[in-house]
Image: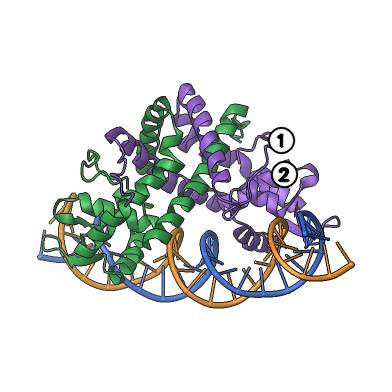
Chain colours: A purple, B green, C orange, D blue
DNA sequence: CGATATTTATTGAATGTTCAACAGAACCGG
DNA sequence: CCGGTTCTGTTGAACATTCAATAAATATCG
């Protein structure tokens, strides 16, 4: 019997957790809807386009892309199929490792991203970034960097391959 | 032509946004998996159980429940069907407003919640709360309360009915 | 070298989510 | 009290996601 009285959350912690849950649930919905209506893209589409756009040669191995965009390889695989059908992206098999595949951004994909980016950044600002004070942004950046890191390490690549210590890319500033 | 150069995110803002996205994507997955494996509940199941458990008479009108748990009425409706089949919850039609329905927590649902709560709180701590400093928690609570409020107001009840100014319930401290 | 394990990516089935359309009850305004 | 509007909740179909199983190429190591 290693039963212990669990460490319940304090009133404040609970409030903070519930607010987090709210944002977690709602924010993606809003961004997704705007993106979908204005540009026919899902949030995941967008995220993938951004990551590819920042990659050298506009290409990334699937596993790495999955890690960078925080999703499982299975999900990415389905996603890629859809995006390939939409002409945003193509797969190319990899010479160096014949198990592997490149995800490559097409010109159409690039243009789609460039068109969508201003509206999307605007949405991210309206619904999130611009609601925060400078101090809050700093704290949030630090806090969430830690949490994200933790989550990437915490599972043995089941959920999503851990992203290497890459510096955040500099490219077109397209707010994922 | 009201075209404007968009206000791109600064380097720091972008880093903070991307970390947020990471947490947004990953955290629910982790909590969901643990909850599912240990107790056969989804995160949404759990959230609904908690909200009902805190409500007077363990019952809530569907619309209000949807608002409290940050989801659309449609989604909740499907969810309720599943949970009703699982015996966690029942629907009762509402005398005062004959359009309406009550969502009522069953005893089985309550017990299930009580059993799951310690493990879930533990997960929330391990993957989130305990990774934050006291200062970060405070800042996060304030910041996200604002953002959540904004999101609730921002859409005209399309996504989810806006939650009234209810004080965060006091009940069993079960960390949603 | 060869056997085993690991890594890469895909697949299909089960499950969950969204969106738009709907039906019925209550509200509101003249 | 009648007509339109809003609100309640449900439904089905399209779509997305998860999970476990698979196949194929490469690593590992005795």
As helix, strand or loop, the secondary structure at mark 2 comes to helix
Q: Is residue B19 left or right of residue B154?
A: right
Residue B102 marker: none
Q: CA distance from mark 2 to mark 1?
A: 8 Å
Q: Is residue D4 left or right of residue A169?
A: left
Check contact, mark 2 vs mark 1: CB within 8 A. Answer: yes
**Residue C2: % across, % down:** 84, 70
Label 2 marks a residue whose chain is A
Q: Quadrant of the C terminus of chain A?
A: top right
Label 1 marks a residue whose chain is A
Q: Residue at x 40, y 25 (%)?
A: B135
Residue B145 quadrant: top left
Q: Residue at x 24, y 43 (%)?
A: B164
**Residue B54: % across, % down:** 21, 49
Q: A155 or A66: which is nearer to us?
A: A155
Residue B38 quadrant: bottom left
Residue A53 marker: 2
Q: Residues within 10 Å of mark 2 (few under 14, many from 20)?
A: many
Residue B76 seen in the figure: yes
Q: Is residue B140 left or right of residue A166?
A: left
Q: B10 or A102: which is nearer to us?
A: A102
**Residue B120: % across, % down:** 36, 50
Image height of A170 relative to A99, above or below: above
Q: B136 or A129: which is nearer to us?
A: B136
Residue B72 seen in the figure: no
**Residue D17: % across, % down:** 53, 59
As helix, strand or loop, the secondary structure at mark 1 comes to loop
Q: Is residue B89 left or right of residue B120?
A: left
Where does label 1 land, which residue? A171
Image height of B94 relative to A140, above or below: below
How many marks do you count on the picture? 2
Residue B85 quadrant: bottom left
């Amino acid at each position: 019997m290693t039963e212990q009285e669990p460490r319940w959350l304090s009133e404040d912690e609970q409030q903070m957790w519930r607010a987090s849950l709210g944002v977690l649930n709602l924010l993606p919905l809003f961004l997704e809807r705007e993106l979908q209506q204005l540009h026919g893209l899902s949030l995941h589409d967008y995220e993938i386009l951004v990551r590819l756009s920042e990659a050298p040669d506009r290409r990334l191995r699937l596993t790495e892309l999955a890690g960078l965009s925080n999703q499982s390889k299975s999900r990415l695989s389905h996603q890629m199929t859809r995006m390939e059908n939409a002409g945003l992206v193509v797969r190319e098999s990899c010479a160096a490792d014949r198990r592997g595949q490149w995800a490559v951004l097409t010109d159409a994909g690039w243009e789609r991203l460039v068109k969508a980016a201003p509206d999307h950044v605007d949405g991210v600002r309206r619904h999130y970034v611009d609601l925060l004070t400078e101090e809050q942004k700093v704290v949030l950046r630090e806090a969430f960097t830690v949490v994200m890191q933790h989550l990437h390490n915490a599972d043995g690549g089941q959920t999503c391959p851990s992203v290497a210590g890459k510096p955040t890319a500099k490219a077109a500033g397209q707010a994922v």
